[in-house]
Image (cartoon, rainbow, N blue to C red):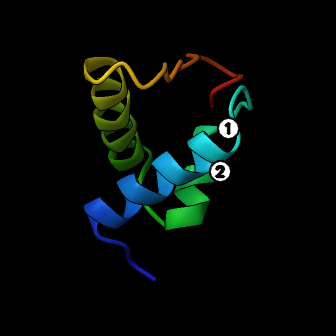
């Protein structure tokens, strides 16, 4: 099933908000939404920026093998 960008971003916010301090791999989201890593990376950047601008918390990304 293909998801629209707004649907993916909304779901990512929900997943991260419901599970604070949990590490998710990029592969988790690519499999969940059947989307490319580059697409999910862009979505995560949007989420990260909105959280920071509105002081809602932090989304921390980890580069390398841990983040896949």
Say which of 64 and 3 sits in front.
Answer: 3
Residue at point 71% right, 22% down? 66
Residue 10 visible to the viewer: yes
Horizontal side, residue 66 vs residue 59: left or right: right
Residue 53 % position (x, y):
25, 20
Seen in the picture, residue 62 relative to 40 is either above or below; the reply is: above
Circle 1 sits on which residue?
24
10 Å crowding of disc 1: few (<14), some (14-19), many (20+): some
- What residue sits 28% from the left and 30% below the top? 50
Q: CA distance from mark 1 to mark 2?
A: 6 Å
Q: SS at mark 1?
A: loop
Position of residue 68 in the picture relative to residue 42 (left or right):
right
In the image, farthest residue toward the front: 55
Q: Residue at x 40, y 57 (%)?
A: 10
Q: Are marks 1 and 2 in contact (CB under 8 Å)?
A: yes
Q: Quadrant of residue 7?
A: bottom left
Quarter-wise, where is residue 49 in the image?
top left
Residue bearing mark 2: 28
Question: What label does residue 56 carry, if any?
Answer: none
């Amino acid at each position: 099933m293909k998801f629209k960008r707004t649907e993916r971003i909304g779901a990512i916010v929900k997943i991260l908000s419901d599970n604070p301090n949990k590490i998710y791999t990029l592969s988790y989201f690519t499999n969940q939404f059947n989307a490319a890593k580059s697409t999910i990376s862009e979505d995560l950047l949007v989420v990260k920026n909105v959280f920071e601008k509105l002081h809602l918390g932090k989304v921390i990304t980890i580069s390398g093998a841990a983040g896949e």
